Amino acid sequence: VHTDFSINGVMSELVKRTSTNNPTVVITPLGSAQSGGPLAEVEARFARRMAAYEERMAKAEFNESRMAAFEKRIEKRMAKAEAVEKERKREKKEVEAVAPTKKAHGIHMALFLAANAEGTSRMKRWALMLVSIFIVLGQCTVLMVIVFEASEPRCMQHSDCNEGNFCAPDWSAKIYPGVCADCYEADPSTRQFLIEKKGRTYLSQGGDEFWDEASQHCNDTDTMPTLCDHYINSREAMSGGGFLVLIFSAFVALIPTVQDQDQSHEESIVMAILRARSPLFYISNRLRMYAIPALVVAGSAALILSDRFTAQNFLLNGMAIGFASSIDDLLSFIYLTGRARQEVEKKVEELLKQEDKERGWKRNRLYYGVLVLTLVTSVVFTEDLVYVVGREVNLGDDVTRFSCGNLGDVAVFLPFIVGVGVGLFMVTVNERNRSWFDKVKDTVMTFVMVLLGTFISDRISTYLHFRVD
């Protein structure tokens, strides 16, 4: 038994035995330069495997470095995503803190709190009050302009007007552009009566050719001389589906109005709590609570009455004017930062923490229902309302006429009378006015302020309507 198991001993024993048995076979020991033997093949195969192993190890080290770099990139992206998610949650909490259950307050509340903050100078306080009142008067003026433009649209020729109307000279005696007027004014005898008895001297403008064309146009289109052809034809053509869409549009179009009512009510409570002497803010608040809702209804009614009574026109014209009640919210979004709005809401919540706002909420919903009913009534029963409010045309011949020019009167007078009347009643029953003297004073002041604000906006809108540069 050979006990030397080293590689040299085994090779020596293998050479000795092989050389003895077969002299032609030569075994090359390990490490010999001679090649071609079986051991050389093993050695070469081993060398190739070692080279392949080293190559794989090198690739593995390279892949490991790449994997480490990839893991670092993933970690950076995960950290960035976590930071973004954290920031998003923080912003969400801030938004929920500002307005968790209701619409945030607009620019007027921010102006009032800024004007009554500690350290505010008198000049700055009055400047902020003027900004508030100018915004509200601007809203009223825009709504009145819509009423004028819808009820007495501008025209360049007779065909621009609805049936039963012609393009007449406007109040400033301009023929082109003129305004659409009822065809009864184109009759020569009627026109002479209006010039002499009613003082409408602007009807004397224009030559014989102009009035001959107007008379011919009215003879062709005015099929109901004592009625407004446009309104009568539109109402008779209205379907049941159109009436349903009218009611739906009235409810939806006045939603921004009741939201603004809630804000105005809370602002009035804040003014009472702070006991601040801010007369212009008081006027602004009363105009927002009782004048603007009535004018929104008037503008919506005027737009609807100026067009055909179809479901499409009800939807478009009824909802087009709701933006007017949200102007202060849009201004706060544009000019106030998120932090400023958050501070306003936090201050208001602190002031109103112990206040009962349920009664005001119920009154505003009652007012909202009255406004919706007023809008629908103004559109459907316009002809009857003309005679109720005494706006029919009387030319001294004992014939009452429902003129198309009365559409604007009905669109303004009924919402103003009903809306302001209900608003004054709400002021009278306001629980914050404890004595009868306070109730009467607040009611009278509210009526005067609403009347004055409406008059100013009416004068401005009339000037703008008939001014053509």
Image (tube, rainbow, N blue to C red):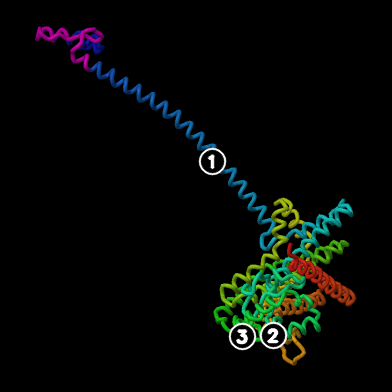
Callout 1: few (<14), some (14-19), or many (20+) C-alpha neighbours within 10 Å? Answer: few
Label 1, label 2: how many angstroms apart (C-alpha)?
Answer: 74 Å
Q: Residue at x 59, y 72 (%)?
A: 315
At which x and y percent is residue 266? Answer: 77, 65
Callout 2: few (<14), some (14-19), or many (20+) C-alpha neighbours within 10 Å? Answer: many
Check disc 2 and report its element: helix, strand or loop. loop
> Does residue 296 appear in the picture of this structure?
no
Q: Residue furthest bottom?
A: 398
Q: Which mark is residue 78?
A: 1
Q: Which residues are magenta?
A: 15-41
Using the image as rendered, state which of residue 187 and residue 320 is in the foreground. 187
At which x and y percent is residue 351? Answer: 79, 61
In the rendered structure, which amino acid carries the disc numbered 2?
A: Phe
Q: Which mark is residue 402?
A: 2
Q: In the image, which is nearer the foreground, mark 1 or mark 3? A: 3
- The reply to whether callout 1 and callout 2 are in contact (CB within 8 Å) is no
- The answer to which image quadrant residue 267 occupies is bottom right
Q: In the image, which is nearer the foreground, mark 1 or mark 2? A: 2
Check disc 1 and report its element: helix, strand or loop. helix
Using the image as rendered, state which of residue 148 and residue 242 is in the foreground. 148
Name the quadrant of the C terminus. bottom right
In the rendered structure, which amino acid carries the disc numbered 1?
A: Met
Name the quadrant of the N terminus. top left
Q: Which mark is residue 223?
A: 3
- Which numbered disc flags the more N-terminal residue, 1 or 2? 1
- Which numbered disc flags the more N-terminal residue, 1 or 3? 1
- The reply to whether callout 3 and callout 2 are in contact (CB within 8 Å) is no
At which x and y percent is residue 255? Answer: 66, 69
Label 1, label 3: how many angstroms apart (C-alpha)?
Answer: 77 Å
Using the image as rendered, state which of residue 80 and residue 153 is in the foreground. 153
In magenta segment, residue 32: yes
In magenta segment, residue 26: yes
